[in-house]
Image: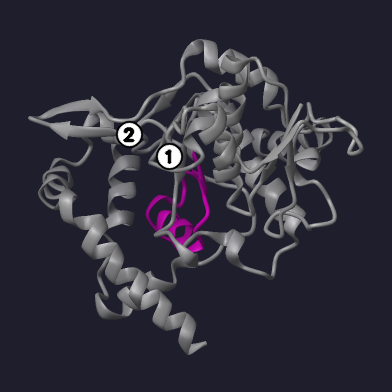
Amino acid sequence: MIKIQLPDYGFFAIVNYAIDCLLIAKNKNLDIFFEWKSSLYGDHDNDCWKFYFENNNISHDHTYEDVLNPGSFIIKYGENKRKIHPIGPIYKYNGGKTILRNPILTREDIVFLRDKLIISKDIKKELSIKIDELNKNTNLNSILGYHFRGYGRLDGGTDLILRKIFFNFKTLFQIYRNCIENFSKERKFYLATDSFELLKYIKKNFKNNLINHNVNRSDYGENHLKNKYNRFTLGKEILLEILTLSKCKKIIGYPSNIRNFLHILHDEIIYPEEIQLNFKFKNRYNLFEKYFNSIWYSLLEKIRLYQIKKK
C-alpha cells in the first residue's frame, strides 16, 4: 500500500491528481491511499479526502511501503507522464479544423473511475435535498448546464486592475454570453460559476431563463482563496454545483480543472472551442497564441505581485 499525500491546491486540481494516480496505479497493479490535509477545504486536523469521498477507509495506523506526493508518484510509477491534462480535453484550430490537443478519458477509464471516485454518501444525501428543491420548478434533465470560470487566478486581483485601466474589458464574459445565445437562446439553463461578477452579468442578460444555486462566490473567481468562508461548506458547495450539472441534459464547459470529473459523471459534454463558436475570437487567438502566455500572463503576474507587496 502506497500513501499519496495530496497538496493544498484547488479542489479539482486535487481531484485531477487523484485521477492521474488512480489510472497509474491501475496500470501498475498498485494499491494506493489518499490523504488530503487542506486549509482551503477543511483543516489540517482532518483528512479532507475521507470527508468528501468514499473508498478511503484504511486505518491511519496502517503501515505503508511508500509515502509520496502525487508529483513524486507520477515520476516514480508513471514515467513522469500525467494520464490526463488538468483542464481536460482541449481543441486547437489548425487550417480551419479543430484538432484534439489533450487526451480524453477512455470509456474504460471512466467506468474504472466511477467506481473509485465516489462522493461521500452523507454529503451526496445532503446535497440531493438542495438539488431536488431546484428541480421542483424546472426539470434539470431537460435543460443545458453551463460551467463558466471567472476571470481567474488569485481571486481576480490582477483583473480588478485591468478593469480600471480598460473599463470595457469584457471579452471573456462576451464569449460566455455568445455561447448561451447560441445554445439556449430563449430557453432556461443552469449556470455553475465561481465568479459573482460573471453571475451578475449573466443575470442581467438572461434574467428570466437563468437557474442557479445561492452559494459562496468571489468577485472574479478562485473563491477558495478567500478566508471568510467555512472551509467544509465551501467544498460541499463546489460539489453541489457539479452534481447539479450532472443532472442536466447536456453540459457545456469551457477549459477548467472541473472538466475531467464532469466527464466521469456525465456522457453528454460539449466543448465550445471544438465547434468554433466565435470565429473572430478564434482567429485572434491563433494570431497571439505563441506570445499570450509568455508575455501577457507574465505582465499580469507582475501586477499581482505588486499588489501583494503593497498589502
- Residue 71 lies, in percent from the top left, at 55, 42
Q: Which residue is mark 2?
A: 90
Q: Residue at x 75, y 61 (%)?
A: 230
Q: Is residue 53 left or right of residue 225?
A: right
Q: Nearer the viewer, residue 132 or 162?
A: 162
What color scheme is it?
one colour
Classify residue 58 by image quadrant: top right
**x and y percentages locating residue 30 in the rendered image:** 67, 20
Q: Identify which residue, 33 or 295, lies in the foreground.
A: 33
Residue in view at x 68 percent, y 33 percent = 136
Q: Is residue 271 visible?
A: yes
- Quarter holding the N terminus is top right
The kind of residue tagged 2 is Ile
Local secondary structure at mark 1: loop
How packed mark 1 is, by other alpha carbons closer than 10 Å (few <14, some 14-19, many 20 or more), is some
Of residues 147 and 235, the one drawn nearer to the viewer in this rendering: 235
Per the image, the residue denoted by label 1 is 87
Q: Position of residue 181 (x, y in %)?
A: 31, 41
Q: Is residue 199 magenta?
A: yes
Q: Is residue 127 visible?
A: no
**Magenta stretch holds residue 200:** yes
Residue depicted at 12% across the width and 50% down the height: 284
Other-residue count near label 2 (Cα within 10 Å), few / some / many at <14 / 14–19 / ≥20: many
Q: Identity of the amino acid at label 1?
A: Ile
CA gap, disc 2 to disc 1? 8 Å
Residue range corresponding to the magenta coloring? 190-210
